[in-house]
Image (cartoon, rainbow, N blue to C red):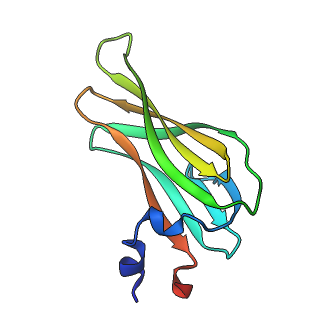
Amino acid sequence: MTFEDWNKKGIKDYYGRPVALIEEDKYGRVVITFTDHTVLTGTPEGDCCANTVIDAITGDFTPGEPLVEIKTVGGDSTDDEDGYGVTDDFMEVITVGDKDVAVQCKCYHNGYYGGWVDWRVTAGWESA
């Protein structure tokens, strides 16, 4: 099985795996490391005229508890003071066991484009 084929399985295939760590890395991505050393990386992305960044990671979880869900929750959209841009707030909510970790994101754009977090398996795919 190639990396590309394994990666297409989707986030739901990781539900139920025990989580060891959730953190932001030095590149501004959210990294979920499982106890079997598989790693899911969420990279903030944006359309051609958009820039998405992680604003904060809040919440707590118990290491070893299973990943239950990752979902995107929409938030506010505000016009910039100069009238030339828009800022969208949204969250990726990572549920581990019965607790939530919120990855708060901001997308800065010109009013026509948007942003998201692109989840990819970045380590451990060989053992699938």
**Horizontal arrangement in the rendering, residue 57 relative to residue 78 (left or right):** right
In the rendering, at what x and y percent does residue 14 appear?
53, 67
In the rendering, at what x and y percent does residue 63 appear?
76, 59
- Please name the residue shown 52% across and 84% down the image: 128
Q: Is residue 1 above or below residue 85?
A: below
- Is 17 in front, or is 88? 17
Q: Is residue 25 above or below residue 17?
A: above
**Horizontal arrangement in the rendering, residue 105 relative to residue 33 (left or right):** left
Residue sitting at the far left: 112
Residue sitting at the far front: 98
- Please name the residue shown 26% across and 35% down the image: 113
Residue sitting at the far top: 81
Q: Quadrant of residue 74?
A: top left
- Please name the residue shown 37% across and 15% down the image: 80
Q: Is residue 73 above or below residue 34?
A: above
- Is 15 in front, or is 73? 15
- Is 97 in front, or is 87? 97
Q: Quadrant of residue 115?
A: top left
In the rendering, at what x and y percent does residue 19 appear?
68, 62
Q: Quadrant of residue 101?
A: top right
Total labels drawn: 0
- Is 96 in front, or is 5? 96
Q: Is residue 119 above or below residue 79?
A: below
In the rendering, at what x and y percent does residue 61 appear?
73, 49
**Horizontal arrangement in the rendering, residue 72 relative to residue 28 (left or right):** left
Q: Quadrant of the N terminus?
A: bottom left
- Please name the residue shown 42% across and 79% down the image: 6
